[in-house]
Image (tube, grey):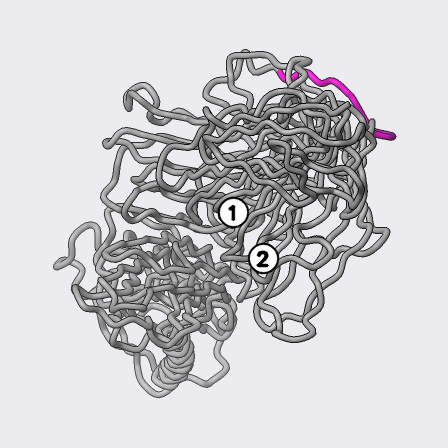
Amino acid sequence: MLSAYEISLERLDNTSVRIKPAAQGKCALVVGGNKSYSERKITSPQWLRFEFDCETPQNYWELVIERDIDCMRGPCPFGDVLLLPSGFLPFNKTFIWDVKARRLDGLELKFSPFLRQVLPGETCPDQVLYNIGTLLNTNRVNIGNFCGNGTVSRIKVQGGVIMTLKLPWNSNVRVSGFKLEGRSSIQRLCIVESTFQTEGEATLISANYPVGLPENELVAWQFVIPFNLRARISILNYTTAKCERNFQTVEYQLPGQHPQELTPKEGQSVVLAGNFNLSMQGCKQYQQNAGAHNLHFKVFVQRPENEENVTYRVDLMRERDLNLTIFSKPTQPGSLCLICINRSKKCETNVTLVSGSSYTIALLCKNTENVRVTAVQSKVCWNSKACQMRPFHLLVPPFLTGLPILLDTFTWKLQAPADTLIEIRSPASKLKQHIPNQNQVCSGGYSYSINGSAPEKALRLGVFCPGGAIEKIQMKDNITVMLKTYGRRWISETLKPNLTLFFMPVIQEECVFSVTPDPKTEVYLQTPNWLEGLPPFTSVYWNITVPAKQVAQLSFPKDRMGVTCVQSRANIYIQEQRPNAEETVRREDQKLPKTLDLKHHFWVNITNCKPATNQQLSMQFRVKFVQKKAGLAVIIGVVIGGLALLSTIGLAIFCTKRKKKKQENQTPAIGVYNGNVNTQLPGKQGIFKKRKKNESHIYAVIDDTMVYGHLLDDSMKPENAEIGVYQPFTGPVSTAPSPPPIRKISKVPSMEESSFTILTDSEIYTFAQRKPEELQANGDVTSSGNGNVGQSLLEENEQENSEL
C-alpha cells in the first residue's frame, strides 16, 4: 500500500524543498501517477502531493529544505528560527538557512541547549548534527560541526552565515534550537563562546579544520567559567603555515589584563581562573605549499586543587576619602586569583572598596602573592585659615600592612585653594632624587613619585626615596604623591612617617626644592619633566645650604643648556644668599660655568623659554663640598704681622743699647726740677760703680708725658695711660678660612661671617693697663707670658730712690 504525503509552501517566502534520492533502489517517487527516480524541487508558493511505491521510503529518499534570508535589502527576521514547513515527514531532513549580510555586519547564533563541537567526519549519538559556515569573498569557510549537549552557547560570524541542521527520519526534534541576532562588526572571522555551568570538558578546533585557517584571518573563543572552578587548556594539535608576511600567534587574555602569548605545543597545558579569551591569528601565506594553520585543543573545567580560600576583613568605616582596588596580578600562566566580596557568588579578578564601609573578602587562588592592592586617598584643604601650618602625616593605614596582600601603590591626592601652597617635608630621612645616569638610584623597598596636577603644564618632579639631601618641596600647584613598593621590605622601612604635608601661605615661585646636603657626599639634582623637558615658561628653584667651614662646588654635566628659544629666553641664575652678592647668569646660547665655588648658602634657578620644535630643556647639576682654605688676605695679614713683630723686637734691642751708650758717655739730661736731688753735675765714674753713689737712675729715661704732662687730659696721664702690646697670631696658618668678599653689613649678623673679618694694621695691637714687674738686671724691657709689657727704667729708678 502506498503512503501519501503533502508539502505546501504557499505561505513561505524564499523557501524551496528538494525531494532527493539518498540511495539507489527500487523505491519510486509517484506524482500524479507518474513514477520517477530523480530529484523533485518545490519552490514557494507551490504545493505538492506525492507518494512512494515502497513501504520504507526513508531508506531511499531525503528532504533538503533551503531558506534564503536576505539581511542586506531589508530587516532580518531576528529571533527563533522555525523548522518549516511544519508537519512530520518520516524522512532524513537537512535544513539550510542561508543568511546574507554585509561584509562588516555581525550575526549571532544563540543556541539552546548548548552545542558540542566535533571533528569533521564524527557523528552525533542522536544523529542530530549542526554545521556552521560563512562566506569569505566567494569561498565557503567551515566554522565547525556541532552536536547537542555541550558548552557552545553562541557563535558570532562576520558578513553572513550558512546554518545547516541534519535530522534523522525518526527524530522528535520540532524546533531549530537557535536564535538569530544582529550584532555590530566583530572584526574577525568568528567568535565561539563556550559557557561552563559546572565541571566538564570541551573539545574545540579552529575554523576550516583541517584545511587550515584562511590567511590573515583571526578567530577567537570566549570562555565563561564559574568563579569556584578552574579551567585547564590542553593543546592536542597545532600546525603552522609558511608565512610571507606577518606572524601566526595564539594568545589568551584575562579580564582587565593584557594578552599573553601562548606557544602551543602538544601536551602543553595552562590553568586559568575565571573567564578568559583565546585567539588565533593567521598570516599572509606563500602561494604554493604553504601548509595549514590549525589548532585543536581541549578545555577541562574542574574544582581547584590545593587552593587557599581564606576570608579577611577590611574595615574602612573610619577612613576618609580612601578607595582600595584589589586585583589579581598573575606572575605566570594559570596563577590568576579571584576576589569575592561579602560572600557573594560573583567573584572578580578586580574589585573596588570605598571608605565608609566594612568588607569581608575571600581570595580564591593557590598563592596570595599573586594579589595586589592599590589605594588612593585625597587630602583637601578647603579653608586656608583652618589648615595652614598644620602637619598632616602621609602614612599608609595600619590595616593594609596586616593583610596578606602586597601593597602595589598608595597615592595621595593633595589639593589646596589658590592662596595656599603645598609643602612636603622629609626632615627625618631627607629625599634622594632617582637619577640613574649619574649612579644616584633608589634601591630600597619603596619610592615616591611626586607630580603636579596642572592640566596644561603639570610638573612631574620625578622619583624620590629616603637617604638624600632634599628636606622639603614647595609647589603652588596641587600635588599627587604615589608610594610605590618593591616587595615586602617596605613595611619595615616605613614604620616612621617619612613625609609630612603642610599647607602654607602662597609664594610667587612655582616650585622650590630646599636642599641640605651631607658634606661628605655629592648630590645630583635634575629639572622636573626629565623625559619630555621642562614645560615652556616654567621656573624652578633650588635653595641649597652650605655647611660651616665648607665650600660648595657647583658643576653641570653639559656645557650648554641644549635648547634654541623661539620665544623669550632660557636662563640659569646662581646667587649666594648674602648682601650684595654677585649673580651668575647664563642664557641658552652661552656656555655654562664649568665649576663654581660658593662659600655661602645659594640659590639655583632654571627658567625655560618656549623651545623650538623637538627640543626640550632637561638639566642636571652636581653639588659637592670641600674644606675652606686660608684666603689671600689672611695669608698677607699673617706675613705682615710676622714682619712687624721682627721689626719691633729689633727696634727695642737697638734703643736699649743706645740708651746704655748714652748713660756711659754723657751726663744725664736735665728735665723737670726736683728739689730733693743734688744738682751738681756728677763727675766721670768707672764702668763698675756702686748703686748708692750712682744717681743716673734719676733721669735715665724721661717720658714725653713728664715734660708735656700739663698739656694732656687726665685720662692720658701716665698713671692712666695704656701701653700698646703686640699679640702674635696663634692659629694654624694652613687651616685659616678665606675671608668673604667685601660687602655691607647684613641686617642679620652671621657668626660665620664675623669669624673671618679682615684685620687692619690698627687692629693688630691691643691695649692693657701697666702692671709693676721685676726689672731685668740689664735694664731691658721685658714682656710677660700674657703679653703685658714690664716696667720702664724710670719706674725702676724711682723705687730704688725711695729705698735710699
Alpha carbon distance from label 1 to label 2:
12 Å
Label located before the other in sequence (1 or 2): 1
Occupied quadrant, residue 5: top right
Q: Which mark's residue is nearer the viewer, 1 or 2?
A: 2
Q: Can residue 414 be seen in this view?
A: yes
* Residue 642, percent from left and from top: 42, 77
Image check: 731 left or right of 711?
right
* Residue 121, percent from left and from top: 79, 47
* Residue 487, percent from left and from top: 69, 42
Quadrant of the drawing holding the C terminus:
bottom left
Q: Which residue is drawn at 33% across and 26% down?
A: 388
Quadrant of the drawing holding the N terminus:
top right
Label annotation for residue 431: 1
Q: Is residue 493 visible?
A: no
Which span is picked out in magenta?
304-314
- Is the residue 762 above or below the residue 137 in the image? below
**Circle 1: residue type:** Leu
Which element type, helix, strand or loop, lies under badge 2? Answer: loop
- Is the residue 707 above or below the residue 434 in the image? below
- Is the residue 748 above or below the residue 373 in the image? below
Q: Residue at x 29, y 20 (%)?
A: 383
- Is the residue 631 above or below the residue 301 in the image? below
Which element type, helix, strand or loop, lies under badge 1? Answer: strand
Q: Which residue is drawn at 18% across and 60% down?
A: 709
Occupied quadrant, residue 577: bottom left
Occupied quadrant, residue 178: top right
Image check: 538 left or right of 55?
left
Label annotation for residue 441: 2
* Residue 749, percent from left and from top: 30, 48
